[in-house]
Amino acid sequence: MPSRTLLAALAATVAAPALAGEVNVYSYRQPELIAPLVEGFEAASGHDVNIVYIDQGITERLVAEGRRSPADLVFTVDIARLTEAKEAGVTQAVESDAIAANVPEAMRDPEGHWAGVSVRARAVYASKERVADGEVTTYEDLADPKWRGRICTRPGTHDYNIALISAMIEHHGPDETRTWLEGLKANLAKAPEGNDRAQVKSIWAGECDISLGNTYYMGAMLGDPEQQPWADSVRLVFPTFGEDGGTHVNVSGVAMTQGAPNRDVALEFMEYLTSPEAQEIYAEVVNEYPVAPGAAPSELVAGWGDFTPDATNLVDIAAHRAEALKLVEEVDYDAGPAS
Ligand code: FE
C-alpha cells in the first residue's frame, strides 16, 4: 500500500493549486460527522483542514484568544450559537456569490456572518397506534385541550424549544404565544425532562401520544438497536404555523472568525461546504436536509415526507430568544402540568 505521504505527493502533483494552504475549524460537531467533507475538500483543493472539536464555549474561547486565535471558521448547530458568536463580535461578514446562490435567504445571516449548510425540522413524533393520520396539523393546535395529558417534550428552556417558541412569537406576538405555551404545558403528560429521544421512548412506553423532536433523531434512533423500537412506534409529522404556513426549522452552519488568519482558504472551504454536492454528502451523514435549491436529502430522510420550511429568516426568530426564555419561566413550563 502506498504511504500517505506518497499519496499526498501524487495528489499535489496532479491537483494542487499553486499555493497549498490550510484552514482551522472550531467545531461543535464531532469530527467524524464532517470527515467526508474535509476529505472531499482536501482532495479537490490540495489544502489541509484542521478540525478542533469543542463541545461547548466556542464563542468564549474565541473571545479569550482574541487576535491570537488560530481559528478561521466555526462550524456549529443551532441559530442560538450562530447569533451568539455574531453578537460577541468574533465573526466577520463574508461576501460570496456562491454562498448567496447555494443558501436560501432565510438560512443565512443578512449581513453575511454565517451561512446554513443543513437544516433540521422541529417536528412532531406521533404514536402510530394512538394518533390518526391528519390529527396533528399545526403547532398552534398542540395547545388544544384534545391533547390533554398526551404530549411529552424536553424542558422548555432548551435551545430547540426556545427557537420554536421564538418562532411562535414572530408569528403571533408574545401574548398569544404565552396563551399557547400555557395550553401546551397543560397538555403535557408529565414534567419535561430528558432529551428529544427520551420523549419518543415515553411514547413507545405508552406515557404520551405525541412529542416534539428534531427530525435527525429518527435516523439516530433507527441506527441504535436499543432505540429502534422507540422509532418504530412513531411516525414523523411536520406541523406548520397556521394551516398554510411552513414548518419550524433550524440550521447547522458555518461562520468565519473575525481574525481568520487563513481567510482565502477559509472562504474556499466555506463555499465548498455550501455547495450542493457537499451539502448532500453532509446531510446524508447527519440525517438532515441540504439547504441548496435542488439538493436532495438521503433516501431515508426523504422517506419521512415532504415539508415546506417556515420562510421567516432565522435571525428574526433568534431576536425573540430573550422574550421566549422569559415566557417559559413565567408560565413555569418546566414544572409540568398542574396535578
Ligand atoms: Fe440535537
Image: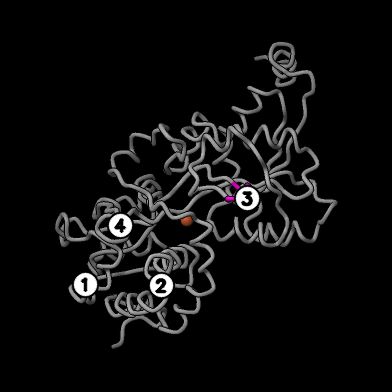
Labels 3 and 1 touching (C-beta < 8 A): no
Q: Residues within 10 Å of mark 3 (few under 14, many from 20)?
A: few
Q: Quadrant of residue 95?
A: top right
The quadrant of the rendering that contains the N terminus is top right
Cα distance between the residues tagged 2 and 1: 23 Å
Q: For the residue labelled by badge 2, is the local secondary structure a helix, a strand or a loop? A: helix
Report the residue marked by disc 2.
Answer: 173
Asked if residue 17 lies in the magenta stretch, the reply is no
Q: Which residue is mark 4?
A: 240
View extreme (right): residue: 68
Tell me the magenta residue range: 110-114
For the point 77% across and 24% down, which residue is it? 20
Instruction: Name the residue tied to disc 3.
Output: 111
**Which type of secondary structure does the marked residue at label 1 adopt?**
helix
Between marks 2 and 4 in the image, the one whose residue lies nearer the viewer: 2
Q: Identify the amino acid type marked 4.
A: Thr
Q: Residue at x 84, y 52 (%)?
A: 67
Q: CA distance from mark 4 to mark 3?
A: 28 Å
Cα separation between marks 1 and 4: 17 Å
- Location of mark 1 (residue): 147
Where 245 falls versus 273 (above or below)? below
Quick one: label 3 or label 1, which is nearer the N terminus? 3
Q: Residue at x 60, y 59 (%)?
A: 83
* Main secondary structure along the magenta-highlighted residues: loop
Q: Are there few (<14), some (14-19), or many (20+) residues within 10 Å of tag 1?
A: many
Assess whether mark 3 and mark 4 are in contact (beta carbons under 8 angstroms). Answer: no
The answer to if 111 sits in the magenta stretch is: yes
Helix, strand or loop at mark 4: loop
Q: What amino acid does circle 1 point to?
A: Trp
Q: Quadrant of the C terminus?
A: bottom left
